[in-house]
Amino acid sequence: MRSRILVPALASLLSMGTLAGVANAAVPGWARQAPKTTKLYASACAMQAEQAIQSVTGVAPTKVQIDSFTYEVRGFTGNVGIFAYCATSPVPLCPNRPAADLIILTFSSQGSADASSKGAAVKTAFGNPVLFDCN
């Protein structure tokens, strides 16, 4: 449910120009990677997202804990902004193992193709880490 709220909220911020100044563009291109269910708790998902964003941007990102189930990690370069959102899935992947869903949203003053490629690079860098096994 939370992931369905974040993307429209960020999209409205982008359209209002709130985040556009960061990327040096009035109307940046943006892209969203397909949501991914991880085998990580939300906090571990956020740590993995921090490492992935830093590997792509070369800059340490900022991590914000929204509540006990939700984290946002954001990183910026001269013309690209990356938001990774880790939230505990409402449906446990395994019994008593609340896995996190990951959503990556990127924007770029160079257009949607650049935003999409940076988002794909973060998703690749994130990989498929496994903190717990359902067996």
Image (cartoon, rainbow, N blue to C red):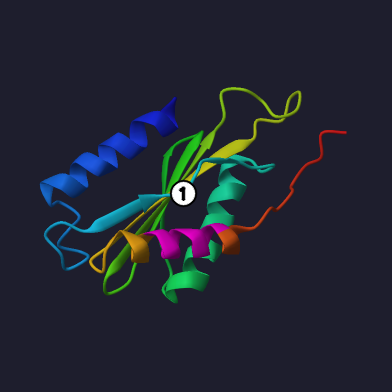
Q: Is residue 120 magenta?
A: yes
Q: Along the horizontal axis of the image, is 62 left or right of 53?
A: left
**Which portion, as a residue range, is magenta?**
116-123
Q: Is residue 52 magenta?
A: no
| Percent coordinates x, y for residue 52 in the rendering | 54, 63
Q: Residue at x 57, y 45 (%)?
A: 43
The vertical placement of 4 against 44, above or below, is above
Quarter of the image where one finds residue 110: bottom left
The vertical placement of 70 against 64, above or below, is above
Q: Quadrant of the C terminus?
A: top right
Q: Residue at x 51, y 33 (%)?
A: 69
Q: Residue at x 47, y 37 (%)?
A: 70
Residue that mark 1 sits on: 33
Q: Along the horizontal axis of the image, is 124 left or right of 57?
A: right
Q: Along the horizontal axis of the image, is 11 left or right of 73?
A: left
| Percent coordinates x, y for residue 78 in the rendering | 27, 74
Quarter of the image where one finds residue 1: top left
Give the amino acid at mark 1: Gln
Q: Residue at x 32, y 72 (%)?
A: 77
Q: Kindly state the secondary structure of the residue where label 1 is placed.
A: loop
Residue in front for this viewpoint, 19 or 27: 27
Quarter of the image where one finds residue 94: top right
